[in-house]
Image (cartoon, helix red, strand yellow):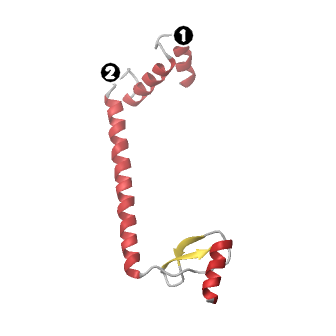
Amino acid sequence: MIDWLKEQWCAWFHGGGRIKRDCYGRINWQCDRCGRWGEPVERHDEDRIIESVRAIEERARSYTRTNTDEKYNELLMAVGKKHPGETRHETALRYIRQAEIGEPNSARAIVHEMRND
């Protein structure tokens, strides 16, 4: 009964903690305020958790890298002709800036282009 009261007191009034490894290397929860440890995660559950987290992280890295690379390459390949002395990236960036300003040969676009160089 006393242990239950201690746990409830901590949960009600201390406002949170962190999941980390305890002194035995087990995944556990520790109260930020009083330092009390919760019940550790069972070893077989810990292995499943770690495997799942790694798979999720790898999928996220792979998706982000692949998706971003594909979109960037699509943008660069949309540049039919790059301007002399510029890379495709620089030409695409200039096209986008000019489109945002308006007519590419307008005085406003030329001044804007000069400020960005």
Give the tally of numbered discs: 2
- Residues packed near mark 1 inside 10 Å, few (<14), some (14 to 19) or many (20 plus): few
Q: Judge depth for marks 2 and 1 and give the one in front.
A: 1
Asked if residue 11 lies left or right of residue 86, the reply is: right
Secondary structure of the residue carrying numbered label 1: helix
Q: Residue 35: tell me if it is visible.
A: no
In-front residue for pair 63/93: 63
In-front residue for pair 34/110: 34
Amino acid on which the number 1 mark rests in the picture: Ala
Asked if residue 36 lies left or right of residue 74, the reply is: right
Q: Residue 78: tell me if it is visible.
A: yes
Which of the numbered marks, if any, corresponds to residue 1? none
In-front residue for pair 17/58: 17
Asked if residue 24 lies left or right of residue 69, the reply is: right
Quadrant of residue 55 in the image? bottom left
Give the residue at the far front of this rendering.
1
Which of the numbered marks, if any, corresponds to residue 107? 1
Secondary structure of the residue carrying numbered label 2: loop
**Percent coordinates x, y for residue 26 in the rendering:** 48, 80
**Percent coordinates x, y for residue 67 in the rendering:** 35, 44
Which corner quadrant holds the N terminus? Answer: bottom right
Pointer 2 residue: 81
Quadrant of residue 6 in the image? bottom right
**Percent coordinates x, y for residue 58 in the rendering:** 36, 58
**Percent coordinates x, y for residue 56 in the rendering:** 37, 60
Query: Whole-Å distance between the Cαs marked 2 and 1?
Result: 23 Å
Question: Eyeballing the image, is 41 above or below 61?
Answer: below
Amino acid on which the number 2 mark rests in the picture: Lys
Q: Residue at x 34, y 56 (%)?
A: 59
Please tell me which of labels 2 and 1 falls first in the chain. 2
Q: Residue at x 41, y 25 (%)?
A: 91
